[in-house]
């Protein structure tokens, strides 16, 4: 099937269409479920354990269990994924994760949530997302790249088994599946306690399944293609920077899976919001709120490139294959978010009237 499509469309165009489709599925169900790491981290840090935490746990568990199930069945091999095969940075994961967690509290949403809300008419999220993309590109190849490289090189870890966190404990795929099952039980427990509707439970699980679909598509494409194809799934920091460069200098950017993700998520979220009559233009309420959002976007952009991924790219996609640095990034995000919420939001700092990561803002 894929071989026929490669002959018909070409590898680059087919890869782009795959990213567009996977991104569209993610965007649609992320909008319906209100998937947001920022909102989940706030609930957790305040000891509430409500619906937003349940949604995140279900999405996270679906990505873990689904990915490892296909590995167990022999239909997926993630050993060549960048997060496992290439050299990583412990220092970048720890510092970048903390910065990203702080930034997503200030910007009222992580990178994926900002993109989802942008498609619904949230201009605060749109501007923050653009600043995130510019900062990510500046951190990758621009003015901020020397600082990123310095922090990254402080503590490196070689690729291979040393980057598989479960392998460090002597575990394999069965243990990974069992561990993922524990997260699923936790998600369902919080969902029932908070009386989460079944439609939201399904949407949260489907959001995680989109990550699995990304792994499967790129792996199958790599098996059918004569040219090398990078094994990957959903992430937003790198694709955001690439899409920015495509707009500015399209002649040097090739189509691929990453370039399909951003427009796919945007379209999927737009369709979901339009079908539910939730499209609504929203802007900034004051200058203080605008400064807060932009500072958060800068912290997320630099933090994501340090960490090797955003809340989805590292926190869900990387964690689903048990990459050591991805789990460190995820821990840093939760810690940074909790501390920022404690010392900024709960300390009485003036806040915008509407939170971009809140259910109300999504509507």
Image (spheres, rainbow, N blue to C red):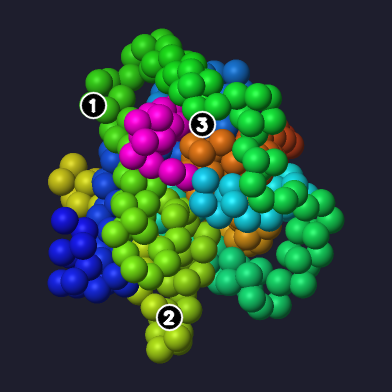
Q: Residue at coordinates 40% horizontally, 30% vertically from top-left?
A: 72
Residue neighbourhood size for the residue with mark 1, other residues' Cα within 10 Å, grouped as few (<14), some (14–19), many (≥20):
few
The quarter of the image holding the C terminus is top left
Q: Is residue 169 visible?
A: yes
Of helix, strand and loop, which one carries label 2? loop
Q: Residue at coordinates 52% horizontally, 60% vertically from top-left?
A: 237
Q: Earlier in the sequence, mark 2 or mark 1?
A: 1
Front residue (pair 240, 232): 232
Q: Residue at coordinates 17% horizontally, 65% vertically from top-left?
A: 5
Q: CA distance from mark 1 to mark 3?
A: 18 Å
Quadrant of residue 247 within the rendered picture: bottom left
> Are the two marked residues, 1 and 3, in contact with CB atoms closer than 8 angstroms?
no
Residue 220: x percent and y percent? 31, 52
User: Which residue position holds label 3?
Assistant: 40
Farthest-out residue, right = 154
Tag shown at residue 253: 2
Give the extent of the magenta segment: 60-78
């Amino acid at each position: 099937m894929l071989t026929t499509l490669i002959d018909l469309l070409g590898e680059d165009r087919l890869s782009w269409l795959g990213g567009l489709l996977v991104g569209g599925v993610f965007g649609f169900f992320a909008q319906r479920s209100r998937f947001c790491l920022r909102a989940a981290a706030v609930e957790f840090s305040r000891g509430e354990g409500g619906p937003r935490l349940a949604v995140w746990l279900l999405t996270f568990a679906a990505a873990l269990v689904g990915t490892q199930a296909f590995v167990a069945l022999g239909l997926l091999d993630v050993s060549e994924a960048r997060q496992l095969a290439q050299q990583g940075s412990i220092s970048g994961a720890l510092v970048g994760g903390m910065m990203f967690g702080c930034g997503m509290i200030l910007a009222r949403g992580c990178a994926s949530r900002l993109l989802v809300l942008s498609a619904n008419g949230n201009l605060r999220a749109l501007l923050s997302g653009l600043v995130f993309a510019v900062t990510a590109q500046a951190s990758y190849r621009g003015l901020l790249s020397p600082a990123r490289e310095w922090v990254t090189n402080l503590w490196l870890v070689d690729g291979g088994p040393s980057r598989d966190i479960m392998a460090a404990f002597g575990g394999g795929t069965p243990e990974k599946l069992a561990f993922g099952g524990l997260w699923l039980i936790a998600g369902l427990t919080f969902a029932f306690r908070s009386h989460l509707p079944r439609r939201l439970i399904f949407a949260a699980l489907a959001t995680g399944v989109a990550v699995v679909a990304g792994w499967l598509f790129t792996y199958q494409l790599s098996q059918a293609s004569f040219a090398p194809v990078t094994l990957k799934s959903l992430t937003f920091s790198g694709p955001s920077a690439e899409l920015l460069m495509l707009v500015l200098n399209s002649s040097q950017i090739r189509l691929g899976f990453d370039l399909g993700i951003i427009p796919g998520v945007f379209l999927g979220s737009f369709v979901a919001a339009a079908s539910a009559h939730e499209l609504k233009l929203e802007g900034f309420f004051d200058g203080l709120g605008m400064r807060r959002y932009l500072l958060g976007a800068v912290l997320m952009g630099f933090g994501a490139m340090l960490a090797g991924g955003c809340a989805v790219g590292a926190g869900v996609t990387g964690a689903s294959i048990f990459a050591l640095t991805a789990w460190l990034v995820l821990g840093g995000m939760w810690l940074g978010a909790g501390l920022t919420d404690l010392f900024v939001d709960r300390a009485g700092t003036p806040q915008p009237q509407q939170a971009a990561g809140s259910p109300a803002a999504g509507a």
